[in-house]
Amino acid sequence: MAMPTESNQRFLIYLLHGEGASFERIPLNNYSLSREPSAPLRITENYQLIVELNTCEEETGVILIWDQLFERDETYTEQPIALSVECNRHVLARGKEEYPWRCGLYQYRIIFMGTTYYGTFEVVPRNFTGRQLETIHDTLNHTLEGLVEDALITKRAVSELEGLEQFASWRYLNWYRGAEHELLQAIKAIELNYDSELKITHTVEATERRQTLKSVRWSAAGNGMRYEGTKSLNRRMELHSDSEPNRLIKHWLRSILETLDRALAYLQHDYEELAQQYDRMENGIEYDENKHQAMSQLKTVAKSYLDQSYNSIYGRKQSLIKTRRQLLALQDFERKCRCDQSLLRKTLYSSFWKSVSDQVPRRMAIGRHHAYDIVFRVWKGSALWQGAGHGRSEERLVPIVKPTALLYEYYVLFTTIECLRRLGYEPLDDTIAEQLRRNFHLSGLQEGTKITLRKEKRIIELTYDGLIDNHEQASLEKQTGFFSTDLNRRPDIRMDLYEAGSLEKKQYMSSFILEVKYRPIRNIYSDIGCTETMLQMSKYFMIRHVHSQNGILTYSRTPVHNVVCVYPGHESSEPVMETGCGSFLQLFPEDNGSAVGMDLLMYMLNQWTGRRG
């Protein structure tokens, strides 16, 4: 039942959406008494959002509950918003702060005079159409399955069909932990109320009851002759738990256990990858701290340089703390899942289920007790890795996609790789997916992810989100070769061109940098003065390269061929714009799947790789 129109509503709520030229005042009126998702109210990501109670006949006001995002190890708790005539506004999202949602479908609830109304809202991308965002998702998942989802963040499901794509290992384990109690209760009920079958057995008894062919043969054999005249082999019909329904249940339980084993193996791999990253980060911080301490003893080192070094170390320590929290959360989650696995295995190898044959029945015979249906439902969810489709949607959590800005960075990275492949560069040794997978775990691609491509004697190394050292000595010791004294030392995508030499040696030639901005051109470029993006691009040209061979240092003091700022533009604006701080290039997917700006990027890369020296 939908609510009445504005003219006779007992309360009226508005959403104040956006700021300045983008400001909208939207009536919140798409709710109803039904839990089924209604036509969603669309709001744009990263826009300011304020909820306002305009009129209310009751002094008690209304309670508003908006869906939130939760970290995987967080307890799901709701945060109701009380709106009244005296306190009629609440800020849901501020434009310049971290946005509380990702693109997708969410639910809100309004509680008024004890009655709950349900509505849905959809967060849509700011700089893409829905079809373009879908194309980006398809492109990323085609190259590396699971890259689109944020495995560490969840939200409440809105509909029964939401989130039924391939689960990540942790997602399956989360689902199983939710279904485990019901499964074990059903198994116990089957053990107490199982479907039995009459089975023929033979027992040696003092009184002969009825002769059968088997008893006659037994009488003529050694044992029968020994008992002649005193005992006989009689046939009996006994109830036995080794029935077809029970054999089917045992097969399903074994299947669930095998899926648990595989999911835990994947989870262990994720943990090991994250632990290795943690060790690398810790070693790097320790090295930089020692270097900073040594520099601080020298009076010749500029204070601004020491401050920059300290701030860099502090920022990396914060990242290290966050990574450690993720490690501890994964470790605790794995421990709980191991206990669940052990409990199911213990159940499967109990005396009752040992008496049930391992032979899979030829037909699907489900027992009469309702517990058989429960096990079937859990097994089906496990087999499809989409058990979250069972039960009430408002009680389950599903993963959410990564922030659109991050997905756009991945899209630009993969599009760049595709451009180079079209220019004849192919993966060196491992495939693109294998190279990416080495640096991929639950939270996405890691800092410093590298992809290596080769064409004849030319080698290109792509580095995603790699931090450049702040001193040449550090770059020599770490054998990275790159250093910069500026604060902006982390390009989104850095491509380094090498000439392959003899004895597997390679000679550095030059670099090409892509800075990815998920913003319109008006926010990143100005023909009067310089924006933060323009200053950032200019500082990338200050990157240097040093190479040591036989104790002789060779410097490349202007190694960066070009810095290109890639942004999602619009067909009506110029596709590429050249400035003194670098180039601005539109790159975005069309609704038909092709990429606008890809040909221009390929042309730029071809000009760079074809350049000598």
Image (spheres, rainbow, N blue to C red):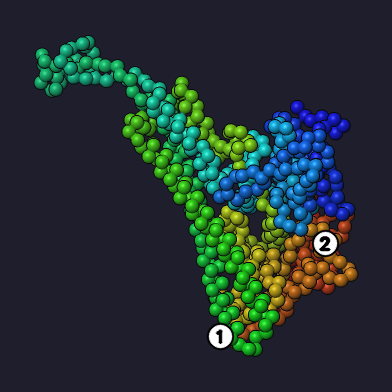
The x, y position of residue 594, in whole percent, is 76, 51
Q: Nearer the viewer, residue 152 or 127?
A: 152
Q: Which residue is mark 2?
A: 523
Q: Residues within 10 Å of mark 1 (few under 14, many from 20)?
A: few
| 583 left or right, relative to 549 | right
Q: Which residue is mark 1?
A: 550
Query: Which amino acid is tagged 1?
Result: Asn
Residue 574 is drawn in which quadrant?
Answer: bottom right
Under tag 2, what secondary structure?
Answer: helix
The x, y position of residue 463, in whole percent, is 64, 66
Task: Check the image and report above or below for 333 versus 559.
Answer: above
The x, y position of residue 333, in whole percent, is 50, 50
Label 1–label 2 contact, CB within 8 A: no
Residue drawn 56% across and 72% down?
Answer: 285
Say which quadrant the N terminus sits in: top right
Q: Residues within 10 Å of mark 2 (few under 14, many from 20)?
A: few
Say which quadrant the C terminus sits in: bottom right
Task: Check the image and report above or below for 540 versus 588.
Answer: below
Residue drawn 18% across and 12% down?
Answer: 208
The x, y position of residue 450, in whole percent, is 61, 64
Q: Earlier in the sequence, mark 1 or mark 2?
A: 2
